[in-house]
Image (tube, grey):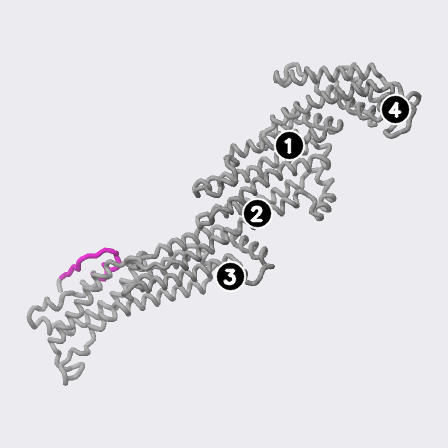
Amino acid sequence: MNNISTDVDKNIKTDVIEDIRTIGKFLSIIPPPNTVVDTRKDLPEAPISTINRVIAFVEKEVTVKLYHEKNNNGGDGGDLSSLLLALEQVSKLTTALGEFPSNSSYGRAIIHTVSVLQRTMAVLEEEFRLLLEEVGDDKDSSSEILEGDVLERLKKIANIMIAAGYDTDCCQVFSIVRRGKIEATLMEIGFGKIQPEELQNMAWDVLESEIASWIMAFKHMVSVSFPTERDLCEKVFSDHYSTVSDGLFSNLVRGVVIKLLNFTEHVTMTKRSEEKLFKFLDMYETMRDLTPTLNKLFSGHGKQHDQKEKEEEEEEEDGSLPSTELKCEMSAAKIHIGKPIIGMFTDLENSIKCDNGRIPVPGGAVHPLTRYVMNYLKYALEYKNTLEQVFKERHESESSDVGDYRQSTPVSFSEQVMAIMNLLDTSLDRNSNLYKDPSLSYIFLMNNGRYIVQKIKSWSEIKELLGENWCRKKSSELRQYHKNYQRETWGKVLNCFKEEGLRLKGTSSSTGAVSKSALRERFKLFNSIFEDIYKTQSTWILSDEQLQSELRVSVQAVVVPAYRSFLGRFRQYIESGKHPERYIKFAPEDLENCIDGLFDGTSSSIVRGRK
């Protein structure tokens, strides 16, 4: 039996400390447990009167001083140190006397001490609970409390209850109180007010709010509450690290983490939609980023951890530590939430494939699908590294499946983006065929192609992902659409400026006499074609101002000089006849002004100047 410490607080009453020392001496000479003894001859004489005084002191302190101290904020609370020291000796005495027959000379002392100890433990348990409730879950505020008297009392009470064999009661109270504190904190954050089953039929805006609360709760638990509970466990049970503290903390935290992970499982079971992608990614990142901190909390820290590190490493290899199980739970939760994330990109692919509209976009403007897909990818690329990780984990988790998975699902997020861009190109080509006017189909392709290229240029992430070759190919396609448009639209205009068919039959094609009737018909044809182009294409749209300007300038560069040359060669033949204004309706400057009015999306009348 261990002797009591001689380093006693000077404030402890002399008579009490003397009685405690007397009991200590008695305990030191009692034969060890399981020793065969003659109950009359071999047992030392028990200091019954001393034992009674100590027990009476304990009873008085327990029934009066602890409650008085609690109810009066300290009051004359007495000396808790002397009480706890006395309780320690009573606990040891109860254990020691319990080894001897009840019919021995110690019989009455055994019954008395056991009865007092039971009543005392009940009161200590209540005091333990009340003290634990004083400790919040905020790391900064609780650290101040833990430096003071509250921590010291908690530790002494825990030591006595464990020494007296009430370790289960002590740990149960600790777990209930601290779990209640954590639950209260979760409720304050806004998490846990609804049952997970209710998530299934919840509107997205409400579910989105619940996810935001979950993220806040997860971060607070791992960054604030769990470290506080770890610190509290280690300090209150510092003398029982391997047997109590570590397991108590693990069980306390594991229950909370499982509750948080259970939420993610029910969220992923809700109906999948593309709008949920970013909140799901936020949840994934929260788990991923806080997993190292959580693992560190479970591995412990400080001197206690250093002493048990080797044993814990051996246990972890066997998969017997709670932390190992929790790591598996976290990893499974991340993979589980990764499934709908990847599924949302599959849904996006399907929505592009199923875009079978029969009505073309008015004016050849940018298709709504193009805007949606590019903006969706823009926001998705803000999570590029995370998405690459999600795709990688998903691929690795299913690598043992049949080859169909690898063939049908992109292995990486980069491949997924490329697949979406290719599908968008195919969809735009299909939509361009809805236009009856080939020129407008090229305007449509230019609009959408330019929108895509400009978006890619402004987002370094997607430009890097698609690569320079893809960007060059897209720019080359745009130039080809431009050429095709000019050929389709203005080729007919340029044909009007050819001399072929304007000379009288039988004369030279370049020097022969001009047929005025043929020339008048040629001007009329030009006027009709140009007016029709202006009337039609002024309602068309080029959304990008630079593209609009480039196309106007390129058309003017081709059409206006050709018209000016044609007009210069043949104007005299028309003006020498009747009503020349019927045939020469435009000056070269008029053409420039009209071309500047194209692709505005509004119909306007042709304004002519002097010819």
Residue 64 picture quarter:
top right
**Residue 71 pos. (x, y %):** 61, 17
Q: In front here: 61 or 557?
A: 61
Residue 222 picture quarter:
top right
Looking at the rendered structure, the secondary structure element under dot 1 is helix
Q: In front here: 389 or 174?
A: 174
Task: Give the side of residue 315 with respect to residue 463, left or right.
Answer: right
Q: Residue at x 15, y 80 (%)?
A: 503
User: Callout 2, which amino acid?
Assistant: Ala
Q: Earlier in the sequence, mark 1 or mark 3?
A: 1
Query: What residue sits right under mark 1 in the picture?
Result: 175
**Residue 529 pos. (x, y %):** 20, 67
Q: Earlier in the sequence, mark 1 or mark 2?
A: 1
Q: Residue at x 82, y 15 (%)?
A: 50
598 vs 72: above or below: below
**Marks 4 and 2, Cα distance to the nearest angstrom?**
59 Å
Residue extending furthest toward the right: 41
Q: Quadrant of the N terminus?
A: top right
Q: Is residue 61 magenta?
A: no
Query: How would you rate the neighbour count of disc 1 (Cα within 10 Å): few for under 14, some for 14-19, many for 20 or more?
Result: some
Q: Residue at x 56, y 33 (%)?
A: 183
**Residue 75 pos. (x, y %):** 63, 15
Query: What residue sits right under mark 3 in the picture?
Result: 408
Query: How would you rate the neighbour count of disc 2 (Cα within 10 Å): few for under 14, some for 14-19, many for 20 or more?
Result: some
**Marks 1 and 3, Cα distance to the nearest angstrom?**
49 Å
Task: Give the side of residue 378 with respect to residue 592, left or right.
Answer: right
Q: Earlier in the sequence, mark 4 or mark 1?
A: 4
User: Callout 1, which amino acid?
Assistant: Ser
Query: What residue sits right under mark 2 in the picture?
Result: 333
Looking at the rendered structure, the secondary structure element under dot 3 is helix
Characterize the magenta stretch by its predominant secondary structure: loop
Q: Which residues are magenta?
A: 594-609
